[in-house]
Amino acid sequence: MNDPAAPSTSAMLAAGMRGLCPRCRRGRLFSGFLKVADRCPACGLDFSGHDAGDGPAVAAIFILGFGVTGLAGFVEYLFAPPMWLHALLWLPLIGLGAVGLLQPLKGLTIALQYRFRAVDEPGRLGGT
């Protein structure tokens, strides 16, 4: 990065995970729950070329799959509860976890695209 006032990579990624513009860290990245805004209301950064695709959903599946499988195995080993109790415990955790992880992971993906120049925006940080 040539611009001394440019935010660090970690600041950009943290802003993306919080749903903020990776460049100015003030404007909202999302106009809906998972709908990416057309541009940043604070600095005017165009988000139209950024597309997270299926990456955030796949990452959420891996994170939740690993975590819930480990927890379910641990609970099974210690307590051996009936299957209906497993369903009562883990299904809501999976559902809430997926909803809770999707927006931060999508924001992180867009911030990564911005930081590593996956979208052409000449003359600005994140462009080629």
Image (cartoon, helix red, strand yellow):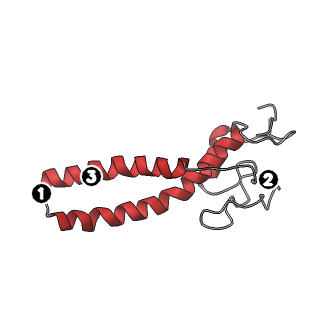
Q: Residues within 10 Å of mark 1 (few under 14, many from 20)?
A: few
Q: Could you say where residue 35 lies in the image, as x and y percent from the top left? A: 65, 63
Q: Could you say where residue 59 lies in the image, as x and y percent from the top left? A: 48, 47
CA distance for labels 2 and 1: 53 Å
Q: Could you say where residue 86 lies in the image, as x and y percent from the top left? A: 22, 62
Secondary structure beneath label 3? helix
Indicate whether 90 appears above or below 66.
below
> Sequence-wise, which precedes: disc 2 or disc 1?
2
Residue type, numbered disc 3: Leu
The disc label shown at residue 80, or none: 1
Residue type, numbered disc 2: Asp
Q: Residues within 10 Å of mark 2 (few under 14, many from 20)?
A: some
Residue at mark 3: 71
The answer to whether the residue labelled 2 contacts the one labelled 1, judged by CB atoms less than 8 Å apart, is: no
Residue type, numbered disc 1: Ala
- Dot in front, 3 or 2: 2
Nearer to the camera, 42 or 127: 127
